[in-house]
Image (tube, coloured by chain):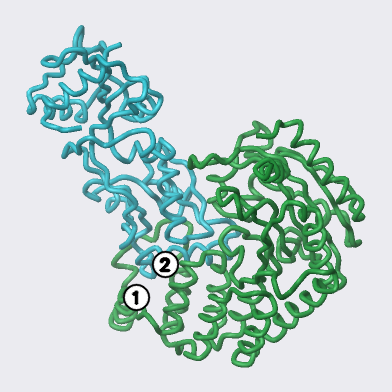
Chain colours: A green, B cyan
């Protein structure tokens, strides 16, 4: 195990390299307001982050990542393009004993730029590739934008699309909903029964029988959802051909070159994919121009889908193949939606990533 | 050191625990005055009886301050992270049955199961500007259950008692609480989701990790388990 001092030295070297790439060094408070992070990530975040209480400020969270505070700082400061670098501890609560540390150093680099996203994606990835080259890591890449575009292009109701988009990061839930919308599994019997009862007795009577209407969620809200359910039950299933395209791209894992071929084929059947596929292609060109070999770089449509919630486009990770026990040494991606979420109306396309210096040292130590 | 057996210090849970051991030929008894929390185990040498709150038994077991204990499986799962690594279930005891369930207002005719709860949570957040509140004291169990089920846009609000009243009092939209007959839920106009059973709990005899047990403790344990007719 490398000492804490060695790890910090390594982190400082990473920070210096990010500065050379034109980044301004920024800091973030360790104590972050908990509500922003909980609203963003959901209640699950309590299982993963240390929540503490300040008598005056309310619930605070020990910084679980830098991205959110850096985005907030950038969005508060105007819209000028910027490159930021940071280095410091992040804190992750471990609910299960798998030997992961509860605090560790991260060094990160983020580009906020409204210019060519393919160029910015390629710049970050090429920089990380170069910095990590001595470790001989395997890179994984993906693009959450493909799945998003596929969902948007389905011939189905806007509500169904919105429901699928909402669960894009929860694969099992997504699959269950998708199979129902595609008519592969029947609608729940309880819903059919509800509609029968509403038809027979009227919704008002039905609710009357179960009165009183307690709580903040009103009768009107129940009525409006019943209307939504009826509408949904009458909606035709997603066409089988489209469902098959989605199945195919969900399973797609190939070298970048081959993946692009598959995606082009998929875009023929599902034209809404065309734009997202063109973005992938532009990024691959930009990556190739920076010397990344597209015949070897892995591309997986669903990469990062379960654990990289705020990324909504390009995603990547670097893995030590000889150390299957180690989490990725570096991860990153594009988070345009996060800037929209935190920007209160404004948005600024952004891409970046983090490297964990302790893991770099663990890999080099293992190699010697 | 002798082997310490922790049992609930009051109420029906204590009475039934004493009866369960007595049925198996091991007499637990309180010593001293009625109000003094002291006890003894008759019939097996080297075992001390420790009377304490059922809710504290998981923590004490995990910390190794008691070696065996009687408490609900819900308490163990709620209070010990990776509980299987720290304690072992020796025998379900057949009493103290309680189901941890998720319940919503009965008049929500549009909500049958977790699927619906998830959809309602999304709509509720859009309408009211905050995440749908579920009142509970079982934070870990409920959070893990809802994560497995893929429910989003909710928040857990802490409620240490009278949880069934929180919906009417407008401090929560739904609850997750233990129930045995469902009577209190119905009286408060709440209904259990069709797939809202989080955990079925009952009083259970547990033991902690044996790493630091002395030979005497091990032999007392073997003798006690033999007396109880268990082959732990």
Dividing the picture into quarters, in which one does residue A276 lie?
Answer: bottom right
Q: How many marks?
A: 2
Q: Residues within 10 Å of mark 1 (few under 14, many from 20)?
A: few
Residue B66 point in image, percent of width and height:
32, 21
Secondary-structure class at tag 2: helix
Query: Residue A276, which numbered label?
Result: none
Left/right placement of residue A111 relative to residue A55 reads right
Left/right placement of residue B161 relative to residue B152 reads left
Residue A238 point in image, percent of width and height:
49, 87
Separation of residues labelled 2 and 1 (CA atoms): 10 Å
Query: Residue A188, which numbered label?
Result: 1
Q: Mark 2 sits on what residue?
A: B115
Instruction: Determine whether A222 is above or below B224 in the image.
Output: below
Which of the image's four quarters has the N terminus of chain A? top right
Left/right placement of residue B162 relative to residue A171 reads left
Numbered disc 2: what chain?
B
**What residue appears at the point 54 percent right and 39 percent down from the top-left corner?**
A99
**What residue appears at the point 61 percent right and 34 percent down from the top-left corner?**
A53
Which of the image's four quarters has the C terminus of chain A? top right
Residue B210 point in image, percent of width and height:
32, 25
Numbered disc 1: what chain?
A
Q: Nearer the viewer, residue A68 or B208?
A: B208
């Amino acid at each position: 195990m490398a000492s804490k001092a060695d790890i910090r030295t390594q982190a400082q070297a990473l920070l210096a390299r990010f500065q050379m790439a034109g980044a301004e060094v920024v800091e973030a408070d360790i104590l972050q307001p908990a509500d922003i992070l909980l609203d963003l990530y959901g209640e699950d975040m309590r299982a993963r982050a240390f929540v503490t209480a300040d008598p005056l400020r309310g619930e605070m969270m020990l910084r679980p990542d830098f991205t959110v505070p850096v985005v907030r700082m950038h969005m508060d400061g105007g819209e000028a393009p910027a490159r930021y670098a940071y280095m410091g501890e992040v804190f992750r609560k471990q609910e299960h004993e798998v030997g992961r540390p509860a605090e560790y150093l991260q060094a990160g680099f983020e580009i906020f730029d409204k210019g060519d996203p393919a160029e910015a994606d390629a710049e970050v990835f090429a920089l990380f590739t170069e910095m990590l080259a001595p470790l001989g890591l395997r890179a994984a890449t993906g693009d959450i934008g493909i799945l998003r575009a596929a969902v948007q292009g389905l011939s189905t109701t806007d509500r169904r699309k919105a429901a699928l988009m909402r669960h894009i990061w929860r694969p099992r839930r997504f699959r269950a909903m998708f199979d129902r919308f595609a008519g592969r599994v029947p609608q729940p019997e309880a819903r059919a029964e509800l509609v029968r009862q509403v038809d027979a007795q009227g919704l008002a009577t039905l609710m009357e029988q179960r009165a009183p209407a307690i709580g903040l969620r009103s009768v009107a809200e129940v009525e409006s959802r019943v209307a939504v359910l009826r509408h949904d039950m009458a909606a035709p299933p997603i066409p089988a051909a489209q469902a098959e395209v989605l199945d195919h791209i969900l399973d797609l894992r190939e070298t970048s070159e081959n993946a692009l071929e598959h995606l082009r084929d998929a875009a023929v059947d599902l034209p809404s994919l065309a734009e997202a596929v063109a973005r992938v292609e532009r990024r691959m060109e930009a990556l190739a121009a920076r010397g990344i070999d597209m015949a070897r770089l892995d591309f997986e449509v669903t990469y990062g889908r379960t654990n990289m919630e705020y990324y909504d486009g390009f995603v990547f990770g670097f893995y030590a193949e000889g150390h299957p026990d180690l989490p990725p040494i570096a991860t990153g991606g594009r988070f345009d939606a996060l800037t929209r979420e935190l920007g209160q109306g404004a948005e600024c396309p952004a891409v970046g990533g983090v490297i964990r210096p302790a893991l770099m040292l663990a890999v080099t130590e293992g190699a010697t | 050191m002798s082997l310490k057996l922790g049992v609930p210090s009051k109420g029906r849970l204590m009475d039934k625990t004493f009866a369960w051991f007595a049925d198996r030929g091991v007499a637990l008894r309180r010593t001293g005055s009625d109000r003094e929390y002291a006890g003894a185990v008759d019939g097996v040498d080297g075992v001390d009886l420790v009377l304490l709150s059922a809710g504290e038994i998981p923590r004490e077991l995990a910390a190794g301050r008691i070696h065996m204990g009687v408490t609900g499986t819900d308490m163990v799962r709620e209070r010990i992270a990776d509980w299987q690594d720290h304690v072992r279930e020796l025998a379900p005891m057949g009493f103290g049955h309680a189901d941890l369930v998720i319940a919503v207002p009965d008049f929500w005719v549009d909500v049958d199961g977790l699927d619906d709860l998830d959809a309602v949570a999304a709509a509720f957040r859009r309408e009211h500007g905050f995440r749908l509140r579920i009142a509970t004291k079982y934070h870990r169990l409920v959070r893990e259950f809802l994560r497995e089920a893929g429910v989003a846009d909710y928040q857990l609000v802490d409620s240490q008692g009278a949880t069934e009243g929180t919906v009417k009092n407008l401090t929560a939209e739904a609850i997750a609480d233990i129930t045995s007959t469902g009577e209190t839920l119905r009286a408060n106009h709440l209904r259990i989701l069709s797939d809202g059973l989080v955990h079925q709990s009952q009083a259970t005899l547990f033991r902690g990790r044996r790493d630091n047990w002395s030979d005497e403790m091990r032999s007392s344990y073997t003798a006690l388990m033999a007396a109880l007719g268990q082959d732990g």
